Amino acid sequence: MVPPVKVVFIYNHNPVVTHPDQNWMRRALAQEDLFIAGADVVMTDSMAYCDVVLPAASHFEFADIYGSYGHHYLQRAEPVIPRVGESLPNTEIFRRLAARFGFDDQIFQETDAELMDAAFTDTDPRLGGINPSELPLDQALAMTTMDGADLILCDTVFPGTSSGKIELFSQNLEERFGYGLPRFEPVERRYPLSIISPSSSKRTNTTFGNCVLSEGQEEVEINPLDAKMRGISDGDTLRVHNERGETLLTARVTDAVLPGVLYTPKGTWLSASKTGQTVNALLNADIRTDIEDGACCNEAFCEVSHIP
């Protein structure tokens, strides 16, 4: 790369078991001329690649303000336990790093409370004239429309299109990419099966991947027709592989998946497979969408075989 990457700082992330083309990622992190620092509350697979691991503070140890995730409320929280050992929140870590490297931008001088306040428009009427950093701890502030109505699509809030409606056909995408409407176009494939890896009830992405529920080999769901063709029975250990990598998974034969499709939950750690690889090793990091050249890691093509 030009300029070359010499230093990486990993925080709030576990890239080794999150990014596609896992083995490529691991080779990159293993380069001798790359210095890696990390901060986390547990020793993840990514922290194992770090030259220095800093003790991160959990969300129980510092003040913060939390926006919605599936709801429309804003809440503030104070720490509920003292910081453990020498742990620090990300904001303080970056303030100290900035000082060491000579960065004196205003943002690196601001306290956590000032950062909370700067993240919001101070004239937003929904705040009721209260600074975000001073919101009552025993209340959740409803994020409604400016006139106090609930947020309901196409009722109280509308799409930002020229028509104000949901547009099934996009003139903008048609003019730029020739895809005014989405359509299916087959892609080149070297393997007969597609594997998808949505979320798991055991983990939040890779968080909790080191907990009891995630211990042992992960399952893969396979359709009875595909299983019969390959002599696979329920509970068999399968080698799931393509040109990028391989992982071992336990077969669950079910018609919950279509023929030609495999399903295994994402977020497992390297120890879940004796190959030391997860399903992310099979994903292609270079494939891009036809629109906006975006990442397209939803599926990978592979083959499976029964391990006696």
Image (cartoon, rainbow, N blue to C red):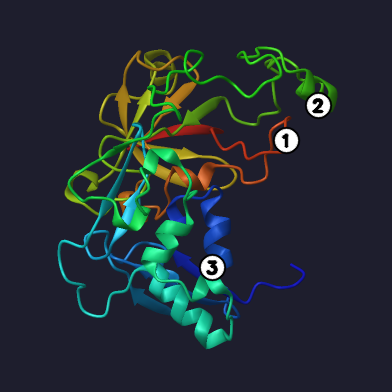
Name the disc covering residue 29, or none. Answer: 3
Quadrant of the rendered image containing residue 210: bottom left
Among all residues in the image, which is located at the extreme front?
129
Secondary structure category for the residue under label 3: helix
**Mark 1 to mark 3 CA distance (whole Å):** 28 Å
Determine crowd level at label 3: few under 14, some 14-19, many 20+ residues with C-alpha closer than 10 A.
some
Left or right: 116, with 157 as reference point: left
At label 2, which amino acid type do we have? Phe
Q: In what quadrant of the picture does the C terminus appear?
A: top left
| Circle 3: residue type | Leu
Please tell me whether residue 161 is drawn above or below residue 17 in the rendered image: above
Q: Residue at coordinates 46% horizontally, 77% vertically from top-left? A: 95
Q: CA distance from mark 2 to mark 3?
A: 36 Å
- Residue under label 1, please give it: 292
Front disc: 2 or 3: 2
Q: Residue at x 59, y 81 (%)?
A: 103
